[in-house]
Every structure is written in structure tokens, then in C-alpha cells.
Amino acid sequence: MLKRKSIDKDQAVAAIVNNDYRTADVFRKYNIEYCCGGKYPLHMACQIQGVEEEEVLRDLEAATREVNTSNTLDFNGWHIDFLTDYIVNVHHHYLRKALPGVKDYVDRFADGHRKKYPYLEELQNVILQLHHSFIPHLEQEEEVIFPYIRQISHAYYSRESYASLLVRTLRKPVEEMMQHEHDTTAKLIKRMRGLTDQYNPPENACISHRVTFHKLKEVDNDIVQHLHLENNILFPKAIAMEKELLQHRD
């Protein structure tokens, strides 16, 4: 777990990022160099770029704020509607922002290090595939699968007729999603881990290298939790509800 450290305006920008990779987003926002050229103290770097020091400090404090999720959360005990809302508002929202962001980090790092690390070209392709496949996947869930799951939940708990539901069965689209789209994502994540040695940069890695790997690992962790909630809790629950509704339909 990252431990929050106070940010000293006299500290070098590179040292700030080295202490907490999440601050890199803030420095990129203000176009402040934080890697090999990040030797200037924060207050001086702000003066050079013509940005307000206090504004940068506020953003840095926000970026390093701790948000902990308890391991005791009983996802399996949540109402199915609440679980779908959680997945959309936490995981979907994060990935829509993080996937383009991590792609940019990888692309920028690859531009200056491609010769030194030949695997970067394949890593770029993996990230591009992940971005192109997962964003439409999120849209399909929000526009088709999740609304139907909520209808199943409403019909199940209200003891309504199954005839009011949109389609005959959820099993086929969910199984296709789990077996095809989720399997494809899992393979891409596995390849990403292999190319980066489980996101472990070499000892002599520069700060940009380390930040990029931290970002990749963060995306990996979120996707793994996302797929767990769907494959092991949400979809099996929805299919079980639908099966019972089918058995008792008018």
C-alpha cells in the first residue's frame, strides 16, 4: 500500500514522482518534466512553467489521497442492481479514463526507449488491442446486458411474469461474453505481464519507466477485480434468477 507523504515544495519534482507514481499525472497536466529533467525543486519548476504553485500542490494532494476498499466487502450479498451500479460507476468509469491514459504513457515511453527495449512495440500492440476491445465491451454491458439483468432482478423480486422481459434468455449473450470477450481480455493481460516481467522494471530504470509499469499494474488490478465481480458473482446470479423465472413463467 502506498503511504501518503507530505509534499515539500523544495523537493525535486523527480523525487516527488519517485515517492508516489500517482503524482506523474499532475506534472503531465502542467507540462512539468518529472523524469530525467525533473531535477528542479517543485517551486522552481512551477515558476519555469508559469503555473500557480498552490494550484499544483492542491492537485498533488488530491492525487495522493488514500481511498481504501475493505477486503471484507460482501459483494456476493449485494442486491444485483447495486452490484451493476457499482461496476459501472467504479470500474467502467475508471477504465474509460485509465485505458487511454496508460496507452499514452506506454507510447511516450516507447518513443524514446524502443531501441533499448525491443518488446515495447509488442506492448504497444497489446495495449491498443485492450483499448479497442474493452471500450465497446463496456458499452455493450451498459446498453444491453446490464439493463436486461436489472429487468430480470425486478421480475424476480416482484414475482412478475417472465413474458415482460426483452429477450428469451440471457444465457447465450453472457456465455459468449464470458468465453470470448473476457477470455480475450485475460490473454492480453497475461501477455502484458509477460512482456513487463510482472511490471517489474530493471534496477537502472528511469522514473518514466517505473511510472509506466505502475500504471499498467493498476489497470491490470482493476480489470481482474472487474472480471471477478462479473464472472463469479453478477452473471451467475442473473442466470440463476432467469432460470427460475423460466421454470415458473405463465
Image (cartoon, helix red, strand yellow):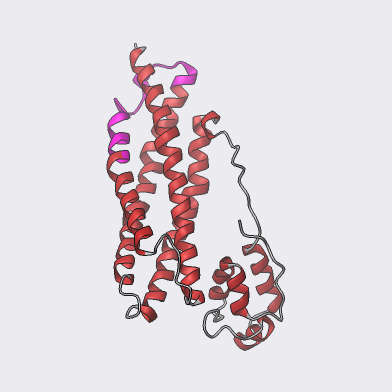
Q: Position of residue 34 (x, y in %)?
A: 55, 79
Q: Is residue 168 left or right of residue 82?
A: left
Which quadrant of the figure has residue 115? bottom left
Closer to the camera, 214 or 177? 214
Which quadrant of the figure has residue 239? top left
Please state, as top left, top right, bottom left or bottom right, where the N terminus lies in the image: bottom right
Considering only vertical position in the picture, is 8 above or below 71? below
Considering only vertical position in the picture, is 168 above or below 116? above
Q: Position of residue 96 (x, y in %)?
A: 44, 56
Report the residue at 35% width, 60% height from top. Answer: 194
Q: Position of residue 41 (x, y in %)?
A: 66, 83
Which quadrant of the figure has residue 220? bottom left
Question: Does the magenta-highlighted stretch encompass residue 230?
Answer: no
Considering only vertical position in the picture, is 126 above or below 108? above
Magenta residues (range):
156-178
Considering only vertical position in the picture, is 111 above or below 75? below
Closer to the camera, 239 or 222? 222
Q: Position of residue 21 (x, y in %)?
A: 56, 67
What is the magenta segment's predominant secondary structure?
helix
Please count the marks in the image: 0
Q: Is residue 135 left or right of residue 157?
A: left
In the picture as drawn, the residue positioned furthest to the front comes out as: 203
Please state, as top left, top right, bottom left or bottom right, where the C terminus lies in the image: top left
